[in-house]
Image: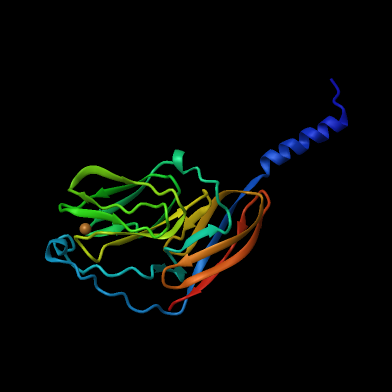
Amino acid sequence: MKLNPAIITTLTLAVAAQLATAGDITGKISLKGTPPPEKELPIDPNCGKLHPGAKPTTKFYVSKGGGLGDVFVTLKGVSGKSTGASAAPILIDQKGCEYAPYVSACQTGQKINVKNSDPLLHNVHPTPVVAGNPEANKAQLPGPMLLEFKFDKAEEFLRFKCDVHPWMFAYVNVVDSPYFAVSAADGSFKISGVPDGKYTVAIKHRKAGTAEKEVEVKGGAVSANFELEAK
Ligand SMILES: [Cu+2]
């Protein structure tokens, strides 16, 4: 059988379109300057027993090899694309009277499970500020039971606290799309499977501030590197 060249061209274009519709945005956030020293957390004796050795400190600047961790990375103006309802839950643990991870991200409608790995009582108290995201306050005894939270509106750095231990905080970035990341300690990040197009990559760190960069995804990897200054 001999195919008409026009059909071959059409098929080739269709295959190419399927193969080249998305790419990954990768990058590194560098930290410029020296951050102020972290402060010891004012932990009580019961939590102190869970830290034989050095007292835990604040983790305002997590940095390794010149990179900056805990930076929230997202694509500006992309909304209404959440697949949170069918995504696997994210997990926040309470260990040694600290939340881990300190900074995380999930989608709108995605379950946030909270675990208590400590031999003592915590209470999990998200304090959203965006209308439509409910505040909650749930006690959590030691044991395997998970608490479950979910937020339907996008909100950056939605704060979780513990009223039993006033130094315990975690921040969850709730995004209305699957295109986001939180940088690792070395500053690296990756947003996978971004559909072709032009985007503004926006980054935000709780202390070091914000930055933006334009990128174009065309069916392959594109990089976006940033620098934030310690304040
Ligand atoms: Cu607690």
User: Can you say which quadrant of the picture contains the C terminus?
Assistant: bottom left
- Seen at 65% across and 50% down, the residue is 220
The foreground one among 206 and 217 is: 206
The foreground one among 132 and 219 is: 132
Left or right, 57 with respect to 230, comes to left
- Seen at 53% across and 58% down, the residue is 74
In the rendered image of this protein, does residue 181 appear above or below residue 63?
above
Residue 96 visible, this angle: no
Left or right, 194 with respect to 83, comes to right
- Seen at 71% across and 41% down, the residue is 17
In the rendered image of this protein, does residue 71 appear above or below residue 149?
below
Left or right, 9 with respect to 139, comes to right
The image quarter containing residue 8 is top right
In the rendered image of this protein, does residue 226 appear above or below residue 196?
below
The foreground one among 74 and 148 is: 148
The foreground one among 154 and 16 is: 154
Ligand 1 positioned in quadrant: bottom left
Residue 157 visible, this angle: yes
User: Can you say which quadrant of the picture contains the N terminus?
Assistant: top right
